[in-house]
Image (tube, grey):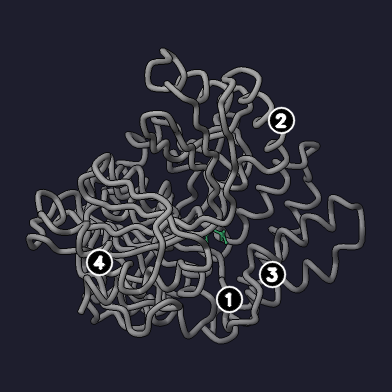
Amino acid sequence: MKVVKFGGSSVANAEQISKIINVVTADADRRIVVVSAPGKRTGADTKVTDLLIALADTVLENADCEAALLEVVARYAEIQKDLDLPEAVVETIEADLRGRIENRDSNDLQFMDTMKASGEDNNAKVIAEAFTKAGFPAVYVNPGDAGMLLSDEFGNAEVLPESFAKLAALKNYDKIIIFPGFFGSTKAGEVATFPRGGSDITGAILAAAVKADVYENFTDVDSVCAMDPRVIDNPPAIDCMTYREMRELAYAGFGVFHDEAIIPAVHAEIPICIKNTNNPAAPGTMVVPKREPEHGSVVGISSADGFCSIYIDKYMMNREVGFGRRLLQILEDEEISFEHTPSGIDNMSVILRSDQVEGKEESVLELIKTELEPDNISVEHGLSMVMVVGEGMHYTPGMAAKATGAFCEAGVNLEMINQGASEISMMFAVKDEDRVKAVQALGKAFFK
Ligand code: ASP
């Protein structure tokens, strides 16, 4: 059995919905279909979820919401018309939206979630009708009814563990299931949504619950690229990578998934396949628990800016028991999460995401000065992290030499190297202005 998820661009209009009917029905194992709300039809378009947020905001401001409501309805009307579905489909959607607004809850966050969830909910109903009309009987399943129980953190909900056993019953349907992504129900029966992009989470939960053979995530690219195509022309495609490799790449801005989105599938060891709705014949990229990599091979190179480092030195630091703990305690007390702590004999740096220290930098430096009495302390802004990732790097001599050689040739100065903590990646800090050059140099070295 396969759980299949289609993102917003794959269900944005009738043409795309017709494609997904073909994709799903081409493989009898594709039994559970998770759908997003209609996404962008063109580059400049607005996602239905964003239209719904604007609509909910208008309602919350007690302003006239008619135009915003009709804009949402018009998106479904276009789909209904182009798919030649009965007009009643759109009337039901309009009535549903008006009902959600009339029964507005006193809790604004809860109301917002009810409105956001309608995007996937109504789209799933339309898509189920479209399948059935095309001769492939399909059934819409409501997440709350099926047992998708979520915490009551509206807009940022998490799945409750008891959901998995309940959702396992989805295996037993004989019709194709069309399941709206992005939301579920709290124990009290209120609608709650995952963070934005949360239909990926729904798909991963269902794949884990029914112990699917594979979780297919359909998007609009043939496969995941080994490097950012904005940084390098025609990067190679990744055929297969492990969860660990994906996580390491995602750390530095690799936009495959929101890496938390697939946690349920990772825990259940369900292989994930990223495929293209517009070119389903392309094999896509597999993300698997384990693989046998080619010795010395690299799977991908990623990079992200937005880091800074606090550098501290103090003569005889290495003999001062508790220095590191006290330094990190200061960060903890200020609710700052840190990334890395490279250290020397008498010095230590803490690398952080710049947004973590925004507005707190001066107070943190003051605390470090008074509590740890360093000889010197300085902050460096504008750092980027560059990651070289591959299970094949494990036990392979010369990988770091190859990377640093490439940097040397390209004239990139290294601010930090971190290798060892993870045996499948090397991490380099460079100045922001060297990031692109650094990635291009590594690309040349590892993917000739
Ligand atoms: N429609 C929601 C969003 O735009 C969820 C999703 O598409 O995954 O964030």
Tell me: is circle 2 under 8 Å from ligand 1: no
- Measured as percent of width and height from the top left, residue 314 is found at 49, 26
Dot 4: element: helix
Q: Earlier in the sequence, mark 3 or mark 1?
A: 1
Q: Earlier in the sequence, mark 1 or mark 4?
A: 1
Mark carried by residue 40: 1
Mark 3 or mark 2, which is nearer to you?
Answer: 2
Q: Is residue 125 left or right of residue 289?
A: right
Q: Earlier in the sequence, mark 2 or mark 1?
A: 1
Tell me: is circle 1 under 8 Å from ligand 1: no
- Residue hosting label 2: 363
Tell me the quarter of the picture where residue 318 sits.
Answer: top left
- Residue hosting label 4: 405
Tell me: is circle 4 under 8 Å from ligand 1: no
- Residue hosting label 3: 91
Q: Is residue 275 visible?
A: no
Residue with the most extreme right position:
63
Q: Is residue 202 left or right of residue 96?
A: left
Mark 2 or mark 1, which is nearer to you?
Answer: 2
Mark carried by residue 213: none
188 in relation to 234, above or below: above
